[in-house]
Image (tube, coloured by chain):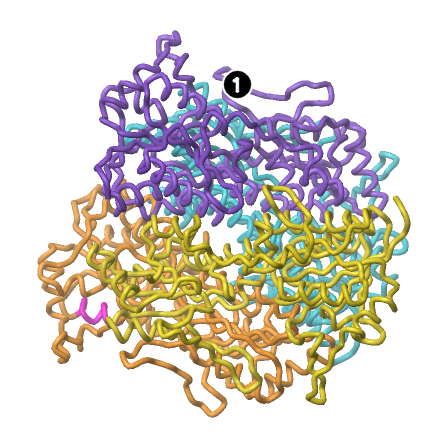
Chain colours: A orange, B yellow, C purple, D cyan
Amino acid sequence: MGEMKRIGILTSGGDCAGLNAIIRAVVCRAAGGYGWKVMGIRQATQGLMSDPPQIMALEPDKVDHLLTMGGTILGTTNKGDPFAFPMPDGTVRDRSEDIIAGYRQLGLDAIIGIGGDGSLAILRRIAQQGDLNLVAIPKTIDNDIGITENSIGFDTAVNIATEALDRLHFTAASHSRVMILEVMGRDAGHIAISAGIAGGADVVLIPEIAYTLENVCQQIQERQSQGKNYCLIVVSEAVCTPDGETVTNTNALGQCRLGGIGQHLADQISACIGAETRVTVLGHTQRGGIPSPLDRLTASAFGVAAVELIAEGLYDRMVTWQNRQVVSVPIAEAISYYRAVDPNGTLVKTARGLGICLGD
Amino acid sequence: MGEMKRIGILTSGGDCAGLNAIIRAVVCRAAGGYGWKVMGIRQATQGLMSDPPQIMALEPDKVDHLLTMGGTILGTTNKGDPFAFPMPDGTVRDRSEDIIAGYRQLGLDAIIGIGGDGSLAILRRIAQQGDLNLVAIPKTIDNDIGITENSIGFDTAVNIATEALDRLHFTAASHSRVMILEVMGRDAGHIAISAGIAGGADVVLIPEIAYTLENVCQQIQERQSQGKNYCLIVVSEAVCTPDGETVTNTNALGQCRLGGIGQHLADQISACIGAETRVTVLGHTQRGGIPSPLDRLTASAFGVAAVELIAEGLYDRMVTWQNRQVVSVPIAEAISYYRAVDPNGTLVKTARGLGICLGD
Amino acid sequence: MGEMKRIGILTSGGDCAGLNAIIRAVVCRAAGGYGWKVMGIRQATQGLMSDPPQIMALEPDKVDHLLTMGGTILGTTNKGDPFAFPMPDGTVRDRSEDIIAGYRQLGLDAIIGIGGDGSLAILRRIAQQGDLNLVAIPKTIDNDIGITENSIGFDTAVNIATEALDRLHFTAASHSRVMILEVMGRDAGHIAISAGIAGGADVVLIPEIAYTLENVCQQIQERQSQGKNYCLIVVSEAVCTPDGETVTNTNALGQCRLGGIGQHLADQISACIGAETRVTVLGHTQRGGIPSPLDRLTASAFGVAAVELIAEGLYDRMVTWQNRQVVSVPIAEAISYYRAVDPNGTLVKTARGLGICLGD
Amino acid sequence: MGEMKRIGILTSGGDCAGLNAIIRAVVCRAAGGYGWKVMGIRQATQGLMSDPPQIMALEPDKVDHLLTMGGTILGTTNKGDPFAFPMPDGTVRDRSEDIIAGYRQLGLDAIIGIGGDGSLAILRRIAQQGDLNLVAIPKTIDNDIGITENSIGFDTAVNIATEALDRLHFTAASHSRVMILEVMGRDAGHIAISAGIAGGADVVLIPEIAYTLENVCQQIQERQSQGKNYCLIVVSEAVCTPDGETVTNTNALGQCRLGGIGQHLADQISACIGAETRVTVLGHTQRGGIPSPLDRLTASAFGVAAVELIAEGLYDRMVTWQNRQVVSVPIAEAISYYRAVDPNGTLVKTARGLGICLGD
């Protein structure tokens, strides 16, 4: 089984369904298979900054339940660039050396970092700086890491948004209403357009395509003229207004409040054509819950494959999903390819082909 | 099979899952069994006000798919008391005689009205005035019609709210957040407390029990002191602030906007103890979707039983669910018993017994 | 909080969804609320027979996850009447005194027994014999304990069977097939008739009503004559053939094999009218999985209420669900009322009203 | 919008979830977008054999509900090679010219054939013979069409099998049982291994890897020695016994009966090590029900893309899913690449890495 190793694993950035399934697979293969020691690092890189590092022992006979559990037992954080980390006294500090020190203190041979492109870029910079052995696994409900067909969490998020549309469909029809569903996805419209197609939406607004209020209202009215007195609209959280403004709403502490683009759009439509509108904000339900079988399968494949890379001494690489196989690529290459929704791609063509208004 | 009859059926008030299952059962029994003619009346009493009445023929071989379909194919409305109906010219008018005229024009022998206590009280008043033969079926996600253990739509709504809590649980834990779920239920906290118990909430705020911000924040902090860095809060839409104020948010047309008690509470908690909070508003997803098996079963039983009442010539009665049987009672009696959450009842005792903070 | 107590809890008979939710509620209230010590007894009464007794410590901060977990962490068994317990040497022995001794050895003040009517009758006999303080909680997917409207596990089992029918519906129609779903329920047809109504079955065969093959085939052919070339049949596992014979199939060790009444019926129908038939046997999926919100709610209410009975010193009682409240009754009374499906009750009337063939 | 066309669409072979979603997308794009006439052909090629052809008009305003409906409203059949079609008189006949005649009689410009590799090979042969304009869409829950990453119906089937494992997990643990789940998939083990990984199975037996009873029993016993007294086994329907025999069970009419490899394996295990085993046969529930969002998305993309191929006059091609895009390839090439589970591929490596016994 080769030499004994000590490896760390951490989850970084926004949580999503399937993170725990990755952790389970890593532990099964590394500890159960190779007999290595696996240390779970708490709260992403913050667990390595601490002295002593904040860790959680991960034993193969105690991870079975993680396959179906949402979130991450390691905790995560999307606060704080380690190179400019906000300190309690209000200053910011470069904590990268503290993280490297934590890695050394734990005596790690390698570390598996699970994150989105932002988190992974930071992890790689630290790994380069400290000569750490890093293997990366892509997760993000936004599915914007272009090198991999699926990132962990995306399929589950689309399922949840689609299910909400399924539910809104008949209540919208019963009351002749315009129903707006605001979904996550940050700068990419993948959740919105995927769920919009799968859930039978009439309008899908994504950050990649600018909308006008006239086009949206025209779609509502055209449907009415065909005897369809209701309309389902999906809008991605980062969609800007036709004036190019971002609609955000945060409190004094910088925390997100309700009342973003979804409600803004409802107000616009209501004022413009008087249609009765209602807004649903799925919020963090999209990140939560039992991972879909596809997310569990991909998470398991990624976890096992990441351990194999370490066993082969192949570092600075990310596992990806391509043509139903796991393929590893250099991290630098992996995170250089951002995937927005392609305005000429299959999803947009499909949406237009189905008569869905994309706002343009 | 007795004499041939013509019966009407209408759905009134807010829609919910299971309405179509009732319609199917009525058609199966009345048209398929007795050979009667069943006319579906559109948009609640508005379909009877119109001249000619707006109806939809309902044939037994075309209703199979209604068993699992959300909403109501008849449409509904919760706008407009027929005794003070808002006319296009801005005036209000008593349209009750128009409704009675519609009933006569259709040559109806009886009408099945499906609604909540408000709608049914109005329907009964019209029926009394016009000597119409009315049989009532209770539906409401609020489950506030006290005479029946279950109203159609309630079980499905609780399932959807519980599922949202299941999803929020692990994302809350992963990010050490306070997650607030705002649910429907109008003046009764049944959805909130049922889903709160079933979904493992830490705090449940219902209209029947006044809360203080201190109590809520104390629960959050007590959990933190036990090493549980997150908190799930369910709040019912009609909960008032500790000052006794209703937090509502409507636009110029009187339509509900986001930003009610859920966001208000989040702002309070965030300002008071700095906890990171996020809000999810399920909105109309709670009314929508495939009815639960229990709602389908009860809907089917109510539909069949309502037809049997007509066959026996028993009017002015409502079917109810008691001890796993359908029992019919006079409508007047049925709607006189409003059921709020009993502060000394099983649900509250259970919540307290589980350590759930009810805000008091 | 009164005196410190030591209480035991055990799960007996076939497992079902919601058992763990009961355990959680008991621990939350007894240990978390009253500060008592709660000991989980393994494998039903077998855990008490062992010397030392086989137990599991149950702490309030480690039971949160039990709310949604299927099965029972305590394990269960439906093998072996303790009064005639099969010993490894092939003999049978009365082990009741060993169970009483186990109770004494643990220093228990009371024990909460979760089971169906059979298990609870045995537990009560032991409790009477040894003067043990017993409180009972009803669970059974069969829902045949007549004193309580709901037993834990029933709602979930009906949901699973209904979902299977939802899935079979369209594949049956696509291929013009007769689809037979064999469900559990032992001597009572509650799962079959509830799921059959909720899932839109065309034929429902239950142990309470004898069927003839002619009636079943006639229903299939009548549907065909109406242009409906498929048929959904639900059959309860304990249905006898028209000759009054039980169709069972066990191996040399007495374990259930496939090929019971479902396949028997398929063979009969196929031979009689040549219809293409397929059989699905849900088996133990009906016992498993995440409990429904209703099962979780009732389980939580039962668990808390059982602890309150102990706090009040009220023993030899069972908690029941009546009119949305928990009511306690003497165990002897509770288990004396077996509930079969009432041939004149609401469920049967509803099924007949919808045109479902019950085989008679 | 180009010239007016008349196109046909048919579904062939075993049904699955997502067929209706394809039909909807084709109608939306062809009729709703291009204004073409779309004729649905009933019962696969049998609808074309009939004189007159058996068709169903498909209008864009009547297909909305097909997005989430399982099965196929056109009906299908997997009986009868048209080149050797079983006639009522017991003879077989080449009906290919009748099918071509039907196409001509309907005045079709093109036909969209939805099927698996077998059905599509036959359709292509007929199209070649009659110079028909054929576009193909791949569907099969077996996912054995190697040119496309996803065939319609596969994701939904995996979801259903995984969900069954989720349910069996805790009931198996509660009773210390071996639970066997028999799944579909014909000669390919994709459903079994995908669901096995996603559902946390301990043993997965697929047709591509021969098993020995000893290996299976050893896995069960190794788990027992680790204190895990239960075992989940997934077995694909076409797995042969270690002696290389197929375990099938058909009645006098050639219809499948229960009692295939699942029960055979249970009997073997039970006899060999005395373990208590139970079998669940999901049967046609795997084909049924609401398609998953991924199947709906892919189905929609395939349907739109197939219409675009016709608009461009590109025939004899199949749409496929590759790297999140639809790509069209010649049918001959598409069906020449059969995809079994690769014994050296990601799925098998993942299963082994997780400690799943594959029987070898």
Q: Is residue B79 visible?
A: yes
Q: Position of residue C135 (x, y in %)?
A: 38, 31
Q: Nearer the viewer, residue D173 or B187?
A: B187
Q: Is residue A267 above or below residue C101?
A: below
Residue C156 lies in magenta, yes or no? Answer: no
Q: Position of residue A279 (x, y in %)?
A: 51, 74
Q: Is residue C47 above or below residue B303?
A: above
Q: Is residue D354 left or right of residue D46?
A: left
Q: Is residue D124 visible?
A: no
Residue where numbered disc 1 is placed: C251
Q: Nearer the viewer, residue B167 or B327?
A: B327
Specify the subunit that label 1 lies on.
Answer: C
Extreme residue in the bottom direction: A243
Q: Position of residue C238 (x, y in %)?
A: 61, 26
Q: Nearer the viewer, residue C76 or A239?
A: C76
Q: Alpha-carbon neighbours of circle 1 within 10 Å: few (<14), some, or many (≥20)?
A: few
Which quadrant of the figure has residue D104? bottom right
Q: Magenta stretch mostly in which secondary structure?
A: helix
Disc 1 element: loop
Q: Give the number of callouts.
A: 1
Which residue is pictured at 47% across the width and 57% down the height?
A: B341
Q: Quadrant of the N terminus of chain C?
A: top left
Residue A127 lies in magenta, yes or no? Answer: yes
Q: Is residue A257 above or below residue B304?
A: below
Magenta residues, as a range? A120-128
Q: Nearer the viewer, residue B158 or D171?
A: B158
Q: Is residue D155 left or right of residue A312?
A: right
Q: Amino acid at mark 1?
A: Asn
